Image (cartoon, helix red, strand yellow):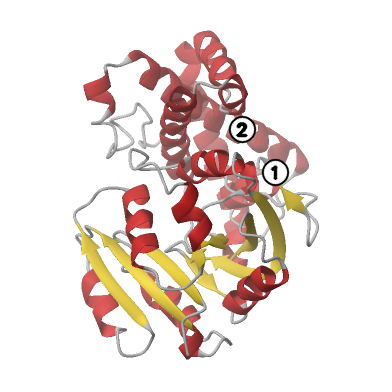
Amino acid sequence: MPIEISALLPTRNRAHFLPKVLEGLERQSLDRTRFEIVAVDDGSSDETPQILEAWRDRLPLRIVRQNHAGISAAKNLSVFMAQGPILVFLDDDDVAEPDLLVAHLAAHIAYPDPAIAVLGHTRLKAELATIPVMHHVTEVGYQLFSYGGMKAGQLMEYTEFWGGRTSCKRGFLLLHGVFHPDFRFGCEDIELGWRLSRAGLKVLYEPRAITVMIRSLSFDDFCLRSYRQGRSQYFFSELCADPKIRAYCEIDVAANAWARSRRDYASILRKARQLDRLARLWQSAHIEIPPVLQSALDTAYREAFFLSRAKGIVDTATISAPRKQQLNNLSLLDCGVSSASG
């Protein structure tokens, strides 16, 4: 029986999470003769190669390792290796529910138009949803992902072509374009969606295609993530040179905000970090966070993450092209986001 759907799993240094991710794929209700998993190890330095190899006989799994080249290169390699006509992009910190592949495949059978992609639904692992910063970025500020008022079967634009939870027809991708290789973190999915939209891409929401995020991120993690996202957004806006993309990436809004607040950035981070610590103390004591603290915390989170992203945009706009290529593996201190207590 020919393979009907390929699950693509780019991964790097996530050995701690991979067993659970692979267990989720082992529990798929779709018959194993109908799908494959293509895992691309993007130059991991941990136990990722050994873990993948240990699962080779338990799953219809193909494994390839590349020198570290970033998320776009890893995704492209998996696209080229895939044998199925339907591609499902997975994240290496999300666990698939048993009907994930069935739901994606059924949606594509129901909507055979080559230009129709499918967006699945990702939720947080229950114990992560109570962590103050994780609750904020998924339910209040929506910096991680947000499904808002989406309805099952709704057709949406390229801005909902979200990496790690979408699927599409392989032929459409190969005909109209794959991921831009210069994106190493963030925006690679939306930039591809923008190019594919000119060939008619629409994104269908299928909430029954469920994955569960199992990795918790801290306040400082999100500041760094926001900074890197800002760098990618600036690159996206320059690459496309389209006023709509510049507005979508908030280039001018971010530049103006950074000009007003850059001198206060360190104190803004310090205040948000202190509120985050206080909220976690309340949460660890199983006491409901007071409304006044919750409101102040959400405001502080929103400002800290937006200014971190604004700093990424402005930094990338003002550095030389060779230096931009070196900004791919920064620490918190490298980008001016101190992780020290304060």
Which residue occupies 62% across, 42% down? 159
Q: Toward which corner of the image does residue 167 lie, by quadrant? A: bottom right
Q: Is residue 48 visible?
A: no
Residue 188, percent from left and from top:
45, 43
Residue 200, percent from left and from top:
64, 45
- The amino acid type of the residue labelled 2 equals Arg
Q: Is residue 34 visible?
A: yes
**Residue at numbered disc 2:** 302
Depth check: give the residue in front, 156 or 172.
172
Q: Residues within 10 Å of mark 2 (few under 14, many from 20)?
A: some
Which residue occupies 50% across, 85% down? 34
- The amino acid type of the residue labelled 1 equals Val
SS at mark 1 in the image: helix
Q: Quadrant of the C terminus?
A: top left
Q: Are marks 2 and 1 in contact (CB under 8 Å)?
A: yes
**Residue at numbered disc 1:** 140
Going from N to C along the chain, the mark reached first, 2 or 1, is: 1
Residue 140 vs residue 246: left or right?
right
Q: Toward which corner of the image does residue 210 lie, by quadrant? A: bottom right
Residue 103, percent from left and from top:
65, 74
Depth check: give the residue in front, 176 or 42.
176
Residue 200 vs residue 2: left or right?
right
Residue 195 vs residue 40: left or right?
right
SS at mark 2 in the image: helix
Cα gap from disc 2 to disc 1, whole angstroms: 9 Å
Placement of 182 over or under 235, stated as above or below:
below
Which residue occupies 59% across, 17% down? 253
